[in-house]
Image (cartoon, rainbow, N blue to C red):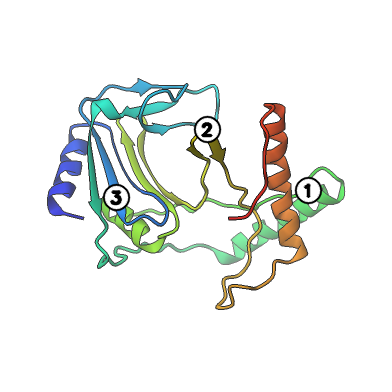
C-alpha cells in the first residue's frame, strides 16, 4: 500500500479513532474508512450507510462507522505484494492427537445416539509473538486469499478485528437479496470438473435446507440456484 495511506492509518490508530480497511472478494480495489472522531455509533436497524460490525449475539449492539462521519479512500491493489512475516509455533503433536481422538470418539457416539447430524471440528491456535504488524498482516491476507473478504477493523472500545472469509452473508439488488450455503468441501485439483461425493452433497443440503426453513418462517419466497 502507498506510504501516505499507511501513515494515515497509523495516525488514526495512535489517536484511538475507529477505522476499517477491506477488500471484497475478487476485487482489485481496497477501501478505507477513517472515522473523523472517537465516538461509538450504534445502528441495530442498519439504516445508515457505512461499515457495520455486528455480533453473533443478537442481544448486543451493532457498531457502525457511518459514511457521513468518515473519510473514504479507494485505491488499487499493488499486484507486486508478497506474503511477509510468517509466524510459526510449536505444539505437542502427541498431546493434540490424543485430545483429538477423545473428542472424535465422543462426537461419533453423539451422532450414533441421534443427537447430531453434523459437526465441524475446530481449534484455536494461540501464537506468542513479540509484535504484530496488523497492516502487513492485512496485506498478506489480501495477497494470499483473492477470493475472500479481507478486513481489518479497529475501534478503541472493541480492539482490532482482522480476518479473511470466503462466505457472503447476503447481497441486495433491486429488491432481491441472495445468500449462500457454504458447507461441502472437496480437495482442490487441476480437474475443476471433479464430481461431488454423496457425503459432500449431504453436508451442503443440510445448510441449504436450514436457510430455506428460516426464510419460510419469515414468509419470504426463495429460489435455490448454483453460483
Q: Work out which residue is located at the far right of the displayed protein and give it.
A: 113
Viewer-side label of 2, 3: 2
Residue at 60% across, 61% down: 95
Q: Work out which residue is located at the far bottom of the displayed protein and give it.
A: 190
Using residue 104 as the reference point, say whether residue 136 is left or right of it.
left
Viewer-side label of 3, 1: 3
Residue at 42% across, 53% down: 25
Distance from disc 1 to disc 2, alpha carbons, whole Å, reads 35 Å
Position of residue 118 measured from the top left corner of the image (x, y, whole percent): 74, 50
Viewer-side label of 1, 2: 2
Q: Quadrant of residue 85?
A: bottom left
Element carrying mark 3? strand
Q: Work out which residue is located at the far front of the displayed protein and give it.
A: 174
- For label 2, the residue is 175
Residue at 76% across, 51% down: 107
Position of residue 29 measured from the top left corner of the image (x, y, whole percent): 30, 52
- For label 1, the residue is 117
Residue at 31% across, 37% down: 154
Callout 1: 10 Å neighbours few (<14), some, many (20+)?
A: few
Q: Earlier in the sequence, mark 3 or mark 1?
A: 3
- For label 3, the residue is 30
Distance from disc 2 to disc 3, alpha carbons, whole Å, reads 27 Å
Q: Earlier in the sequence, mark 2 or mark 3?
A: 3
Amino acid at each position: 500500500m502507498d506510504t501516505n495511506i499507511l501513515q494515515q492509518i497509523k495516525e488514526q490508530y495512535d489517536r484511538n479513532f475507529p477505522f476499517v480497511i477491506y477488500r471484497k472478494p475478487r476485487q482489485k480495489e481496497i477501501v478505507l474508512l477513517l472515522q473523523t472522531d472517537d465516538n461509538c455509533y450504534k445502528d441495530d436497524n442498519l439504516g445508515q450507510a457505512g461499515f457495520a460490525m455486528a455480533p453473533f449475539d443478537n442481544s448486543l449492539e451493532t457498531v457502525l462507522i457511518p459514511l457521513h462521519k468518515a473519510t473514504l479512500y479507494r485505491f488499487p491493489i499493488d499486484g507486486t505484494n508478497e506474503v511477509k512475516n510468517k509466524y510459526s509455533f510449536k505444539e505437542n503433536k502427541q498431546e493434540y492427537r490424543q485430545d483429538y481422538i477423545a473428542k472424535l470418539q465422543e462426537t461419533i457416539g453423539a451422532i450414533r445416539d441421534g443427537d447430531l447430524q453434523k459437526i465441524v471440528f475446530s481449534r484455536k491456535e494461540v501464537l506468542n509473538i513479540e509484535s504484530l504488524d496488523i497492516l502487513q498482516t492485512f496485506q498478506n491476507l489480501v495477497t494470499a486469499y483473492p477470493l475472500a473478504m479481507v478486513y481489518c477493523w479497529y475501534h478503541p472500545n472493541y480492539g482490532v478485528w482482522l480476518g479473511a472469509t470466503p462466505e457472503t452473508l447476503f447481497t441486495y439488488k433491486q429488491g432481491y437479496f441472495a445468500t449462500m450455503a457454504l458447507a461441502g468441501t472437496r480437495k482442490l485439483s487441476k480437474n475443476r470438473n471433479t464430481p461431488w461425493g454423496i457425503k459432500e452433497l449431504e453436508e451442503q443440503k443440510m445448510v441449504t435446507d436450514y436457510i430455506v426453513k428460516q426464510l419460510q418462517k419469515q414468509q419470504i419466497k426463495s429460489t435455490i440456484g448454483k453460483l
